[in-house]
Image (cartoon, helix red, strand yellow):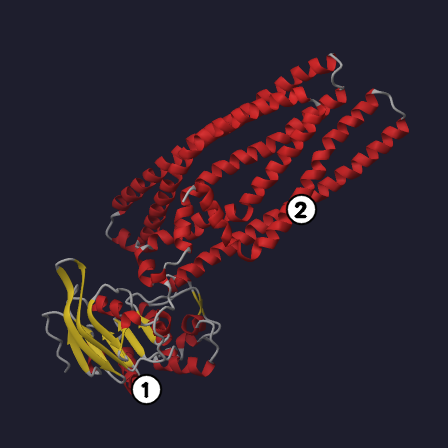
Amino acid sequence: MNSWRKLLKIQSYIGPYRLRRYYVTGLCGLEIIVGSVLPALFGNLVTKVQELEPLAAILRYGAFLFALGILDILLDVWQSYEWHSFSVEYGDYFRLRMMECAFRKSPALIREKQKDLHSRILNDGAVVAGKIGVGFPMLTLNILRIALVLGFMTTISLRLSFVILAVVPVYVVFLQSTQRQIQTNSRKEREAFSDLNAGIREILYGFFQIRIFQREPFFLKRIEDQTDGFETCSKSIKRYTAFSEGIGKLFTTLLPIIILILGSVEVASGRMTLGNLFSFYFYLSFLYEPMNNLADYFTSLQVALGVVDRVLEFLEPEPAEESDRGEKIESVQEIRLEGLSFSYAPGSPVLDHFSLALRKGDIVGVIGASGSGKTTLAEILMKLHDAYSGSIQINGSELREISRDSFYRRLSYIDQSPFIFQGTLKENIAFDDDEPDKLRRVLRDVQLDGFQDADPEVFRIDDMGQNLSGGEKQRIALARALYKDADFLILDEFTSALDEATEGEIISKLKENIAKDRIILMITHRKAPLRICSHVVELSSVPAPALD
């Protein structure tokens, strides 16, 4: 897809802001028309003074110009506010649109490209949003201003206008020669920035471990290498950008001198009035801003084209990523795995002809050494890996053929590292649902009913649960899983941070009140959860622990 087709394609994402963009563009166009008339009128005023017209006529004309100038100022303030407000609002809308697309993607795809997504949504998204929201209007409005100004200049002096028309194409040719290099380096810079961003996040996440192991120099070297890669790409872009700006500076510095010299000759020869030279020189200053804007536009356009493929790839769902395709299910009554095999690399199976049957009321424990396939089994059952052989039947239907959305509505999951976000305790369990009795019930089931003597709707949790213990995070995650009332629960080391007394109470509640209407798959090495299992599956040669 060529550059202009990419730009036209990306314009289709303007969404509900199309009419707003027309309104802002029209308002800006009106200000440009009013502002473009003023220099010609100013020149006429100078001519009237030079020709000694009656003072009353000059004052009336001056009052008219003053009123027109006030109107131009008001229009300029109005359009500036509307323009920048629209730019901010559309940028926020576009980021939300990208997040919506992220939620429609396959979870496996998101996991695979996780480190890159933050940069795509916040950085690449902002660049492309600018081109969608104000990019084409900026191009149109600056061309309009240049056309109006050149039209007035041609009317004033055709000879001097030829000088302008001779210089502008040279300016454009030199400008375009730098653009391809900027585009080439822009994509590399975005990718390097994404790597650097991910590296810094990793260090901050593991900051305490790094300090304990005293490996600051090791991680500083990693960041230094990533910074060097980003710096190399950025410098290449800045070098070509500086060259582009230098060409613009040459245009704005030398051209006025040439025009004044040639204009003086025209005035001296009687082919031009002093007022007309004043207007022409005034119009020359009107060319600088739109010419520089066009230079900035085409420079930033190359940057945008460097990342637009990344954004389009993200925005356009492929059929395999459509989360609601496939058979719909209303419940999970039975799960049957027959001859399930899976490998990440040829010849190294993680699961080899594994079979298992689960029905409502079953609590199945999964144990095994590290790398034996416990987490992989859970991920396959959550539709994160489709490249398995054998069969996984849900109520008699193949898992691959079942709609991801309908299956996820009947599934709950607790990860080894619980997902805790900034918000209230209630929000971390029930999100935006409002069922107080149900919330109180699950809080009792996970031993959180008296949590810090706080109201769950008031108690606030810090970013990533920094004001919680590991055990509190696990209990909140379990409460969330139980609140959903799903048919199928996958619990991955869900009590690893709990003390024995709390673990015992929670396991007892799980057995007595919760398990009978669900299928529960537990991945655990703790004895207490395994005691309530209807059977235990071993995925390694390590024997199951004694359940005394």
In which image quadrant can residue 532 be found?
bottom left
Residue at the (23%, 73%) spot, across then down:
392
Per the image, the residue denoted by label 1 is 513
User: In the rendered view, does 329 fall on the left or right side of 245?
Assistant: left
Amino acid type shown at disc 2: Leu
Q: What is the x, y in percent for residue 548?
A: 14, 82
Mark 2 is surrounded, within 10 Å at the Cα level, by few (under 14), some (14 to 19) or many (20 or more) other residues, namely: some
Per the image, the residue denoted by label 2 is 27
Mark 2 or mark 1: which is in front? 2
* Distance in Å between CA atoms under marks 2 and 1: 65 Å
Residue at the (9%, 70%) spot, across then down:
541
In which image quadrant can residue 161 be found?
top right
Q: Name the foreground residue: 206 vs 124.
A: 124
User: In the rendered view, does 299 fall on the left or right side of 119?
Assistant: right
The mark tally for this picture is 2
Task: Please determine whether, in this image, residue 285 is positioned above or below residue 2.
Answer: above
Name the secondary structure under disc 1: helix
Q: What is the x, y in percent for residue 163?
A: 61, 20
Amino acid type shown at disc 1: Asn
Q: What is the x, y in percent for residue 106?
A: 34, 62
Q: Is residue 360 visible?
A: yes
